[in-house]
Image (cartoon, helix red, strand yellow):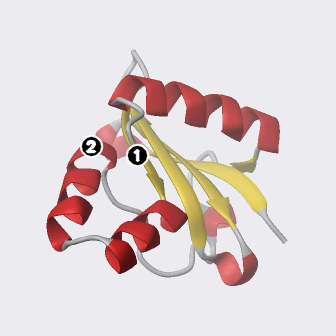
Amino acid sequence: MTIWFRTYYEVEDLWLYFEAGDKGWVARQIEVQGKDSRAVTAACLEEVLHLRDGADIAAVGRYERQYDVLAKGPVDGWEDQPEAAEISAEEFERLWIEARRALGNSA
């Protein structure tokens, strides 16, 4: 079952949005920072795996410089994080499109 949720990391004024599938593994991740909600991350596991399995390491590096990296491991216990809340698939998708547009949607 897929879930969508957000948490907040106050030290960096960073909102983290996750789409997580079975066993809590992150499928897509968005991070926006600051009062202007500047996108800093919009990474997708499927894209990373495709690049890793079908291209050279340089392609993975370019992807990570453009879209950053996904959380490592399952995101268990997210409910206990500051400002944690489930969000709708539609809200996540809207944020995903905005973040990708801001970071240059070329993947």
- In the picture, residue 34 is in which quadrant? top left
Vertical relation: 23 (above or below) 17: below
Label 1 SS: loop
Task: Please state which amino acid type lies under the numbered disc 2.
Answer: Gln
Q: Which residue is mark 1?
A: 107
Viewport quadrant of the N terminus = bottom right
Cα separation, mark 2 vs mark 1, equals: 9 Å
Label disc, if present, on residue 48 of the rendered structure = none
First-in-chain label (2 vs 1):
2
Taking the view exactly as shown, the residue that stands out farthest to the front is: 54
Left-right relation of 98 to 36: right
Residue 5 position in % (x across, y down): 69, 52
Depth check, front residue: 48 or 102: 48
Depth check, front residue: 38 or 78: 38
Residue 77 position in % (x across, y down): 63, 74
Left-right relation of 2 to 104: right
Q: Which residue is mark 2?
A: 66
Task: Please state which amino acid type lies under the numbered disc 1.
Answer: Ala
Left-right relation of 92 to 89: left
Taking the view exactly as shown, the residue that stands out farthest to the left is: 58
